[in-house]
């Protein structure tokens, strides 16, 4: 099972008890600060490189929810807005990370009670035989209650080529809960843009129940370089000047090769660079210092197969 | 006759909101929750039918309430109870058990006394519907 449950961070500051009389005015800026939404948005800005349109959309959504909450306090609106979302974009563009932040945001605004994120794929929802799917889907839904259910590569749920596919059953249960228990959980569907579009076309029920469609653009080369810096800093590594130049070159080359997965490709490249660095230090023998242990040099990156035209198997296919 | 089994059974029936709050308390203690039902509340009938497996890894009472509602819909005229299991000792121990649904007309219990050897009396209790 690939189900992962991520708990939210710290609890938000306790709100003062609500007065019986609805307030006549609400300071939105103060509400923004006190609810901790400002903090989440700041974190989002600081920790995620690029993704401008995504951040903009999230800020807009936060503003909408904040205003809606103020309206509710004054008795102007009764219904909960539809919060189900769709994240589309290529692999490695930060959909899961943003979903995690979104869960935190919704929790701070009081739209979900617990604020945890349950991340699942088709395997966690769809069963192997008749009568297996419903309990499995319900199990996942129960675990996600009070939080956010993140369905990665949601289009795999629907397989038009097999009309007896159990995915349809999972879809029906999902739709029912998404409609009837909007107060209890928020569903985020994620996947590649083109395949998600096809999925929505064949399942209009989903399209109409999802209010927020957020598209994740690919990262630019400079952004990927910034991401690699952040990743390395987090692990107490750094690139020297030569390695930085090599990395810039690496990103430009890697993008043109198949199976490019944005930030995920960068993470894998850095993992391999660390492996080579370790090997290099080990073979050099003698004493190593802090500087040696934390520096990745150009040689560590230039040894990558990306510079010789990609993986051997793929080169053969191309020729 | 009102059956008084489990916690809260001398109180008026709990509302859904109150049940939710109790479930929330259980989940905060990391207890798993099982839904069980029966039509025979005889005290010796301690093994009720299970409504699915006990639920682990839940965060919110809404999930349990979903099952309670489903069970009520299927067995509106049965007894339904929630059991909360604590696993801190390495095995699942029932820490809290309470009734969340009762039939409209509750059964009574009938005592049958049989005189056996000497002046001994054997009492048998049976559920009378």
Image (spheres, helix red, strand yellow):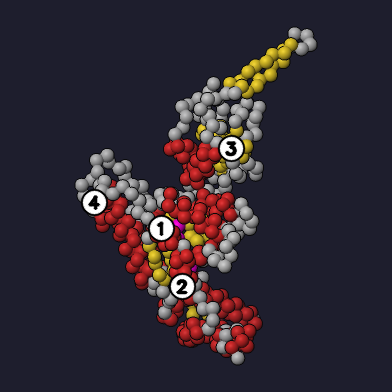
Read off the residue under disc 2.
Answer: A194
- Marks 1/3: CA distance? 34 Å
Work out whether residue A132 or residue A257 is closer to the camera in this orientation and state it. Answer: A132
Work out whether residue A166 or residue A78 is closer to the camera in this orientation and state it. Answer: A166
Which element carries disc 2, helix, strand or loop?
helix
Residue A306 x, y percent position in the rendering: 55, 85
User: Which numbered disc, 1 or 3, marks the residue closer to the eye?
Assistant: 1
Q: Quadrant of the N terminus of chain B?
A: top right
What's the mark number on residue B36?
A: 3
Read off the residue under disc 4.
Answer: A26
Residue A84 x, y percent position in the rendering: 41, 58
Q: Which residues are magenta?
A: A187-194
Q: Quadrant of the C terminus of chain B?
A: top right
Q: Are the numbered discs 2 and 1 placed on the same chain, yes or no?
A: yes
| Residue A89 among those drawn in magenta | no
Badge 4 vs badge 2, beta-carbon distance below 8 Å: no
Residue drawn at (51%, 70%) of the image: A235
Question: Tag 3, which chain?
Answer: B
């Amino acid at each position: 099972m690939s189900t992962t449950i991520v708990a939210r961070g710290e609890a938000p500051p306790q709100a003062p008890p609500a007065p019986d009389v609805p307030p006549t005015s609400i300071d939105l800026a103060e509400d923004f600060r006190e609810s901790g939404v400002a903090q989440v948005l700041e974190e989002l800005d600081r920790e995620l490189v690029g993704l401008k349109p995504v951040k903009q959309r999230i800020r807009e959504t936060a503003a909408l929810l904040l205003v809606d909450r103020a309206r509710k306090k004054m008795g102007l609106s009764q219904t909960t807005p539809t919060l189900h979302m769709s994240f589309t974009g290529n692999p490695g563009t930060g959909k899961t990370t943003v979903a995690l932040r979104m869960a935190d945001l919704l929790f701070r605004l009081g739209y979900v009670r617990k604020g945890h994120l349950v991340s699942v794929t088709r395997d966690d929802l769809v069963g192997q035989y008749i009568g297996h799917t419903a309990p499995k889907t319900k199990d996942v839904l129960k675990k996600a209650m009070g939080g956010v259910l993140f369905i990665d590569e949601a289009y795999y749920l629907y397989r038009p080529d097999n009309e007896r596919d159990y995915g349809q059953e999972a879809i029906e249960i999902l739709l029912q809960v998404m409609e009837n228990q909007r107060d209890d959980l928020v569903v985020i569907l994620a996947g590649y843009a083109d395949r998600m579009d096809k999925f929505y076309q064949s399942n209009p029920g989903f399209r109409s129940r999802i209010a927020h469609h957020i598209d994740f653009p690919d990262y630019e080369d400079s952004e990927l370089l910034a991401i690699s810096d952040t990743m390395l800093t987090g692990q107490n590594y750094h690139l020297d000047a030569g390695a930085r130049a090599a990395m810039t070159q690496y990103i430009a080359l890697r993008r043109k090769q198949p199976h490019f997965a944005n930030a995920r490709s960068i993470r894998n490249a850095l993992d391999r660079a660390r492996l080579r660095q370790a090997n290099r230090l080990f073979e050099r023998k003698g004493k190593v210092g802090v500087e040696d242990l934390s520096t990745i040099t150009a040689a560590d990156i230039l040894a990558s197969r990306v510079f010789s035209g990609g993986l051997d198997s793929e080169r053969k296919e191309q020729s | 006759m009102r059956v008084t089994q489990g916690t809260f059974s001398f109180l008026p029936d709990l509302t859904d909101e109150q049940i939710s709050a109790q479930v929330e308390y259980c989940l905060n203690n990391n207890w798993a929750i099982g839904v069980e039902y029966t039509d025979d509340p005889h005290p010796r009938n301690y093994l009720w039918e299970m409504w699915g497996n006990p639920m682990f890894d839940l965060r919110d009472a809404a999930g349990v309430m979903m099952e309670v509602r489903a069970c009520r819909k299927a067995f509106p005229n049965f007894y339904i109870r929630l059991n909360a299991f604590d696993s801190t000792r390495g095995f699942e121990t029932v820490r809290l058990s309470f009734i969340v649904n009762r039939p409209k007309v509750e059964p009574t219990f009938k005592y049958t006394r049989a005189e056996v050897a000497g002046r001994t009396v054997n009492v048998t209790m049976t559920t009378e519907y």
